Amino acid sequence: MSAHYELKPAAGKQFMFNLKAANGEVILTSENYKEKEGALNGIESVKKNSPDDKQYERKTSKSDQPYFVLKAKNHEIIGKSEMYSSPSAMEKGIESVKKNGPVATTNDLT
């Protein structure tokens, strides 16, 4: 299986997507969108912004776990990672999004 975006329904008749690596692991989760078109635009934004390291904000949760957010050029958050066990694991997650984000196909589950 290759890397892909999974577009799916979210709570309250909204939409969201996950970017999944070739092994099926979720590497980026979107915000919720009111319209399906918004979620599709979000996927396009990930494709465009994911190769650029400047668009990633590396963070630490309150429980001291590293994670990252991917932002568009307008500084809006496009997606967020899972919590990682170490900064090096988080960097591998970022590298995976950089590699897979621009080329992943979209599976529409709506």
Image (tube, grey):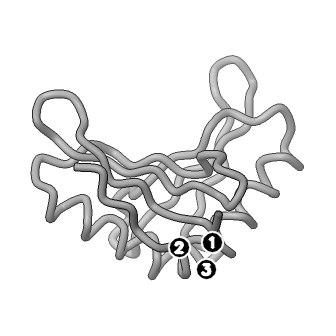
Q: Which residue is mark 2?
A: 104
Q: Nearer the viewer, residue 102 or 104?
A: 104
- Asked which quadrant contains residue 61, the reply is top right
Image location (x, y in percent) of residue 28: 54, 51
Check contact, mark 2 vs mark 1: CB within 8 A: yes
Pick whichever of labels 3 and 1 is earlier in the sequence.
3
**Residue found at the far top of this picture:** 63
Q: Residue at x 69, y 75 (%)?
A: 99
Q: Which residue is mark 3?
A: 51
Amino acid at circle 2: Ala
Q: Which residue is mark 1?
A: 100
Amino acid at circle 1: Asn
Please give the label number shown on residue 50. Answer: none
Check contact, mark 3 vs mark 1: CB within 8 A: no
Helix, strand or loop at mark 1:
helix
Badge 3 local density, few (<14 within 10 Å), some, or many (20+)? some
Q: Nearer the viewer, residue 70 or 19?
A: 19
Helix, strand or loop at mark 3:
loop
Amino acid at circle 3: Pro
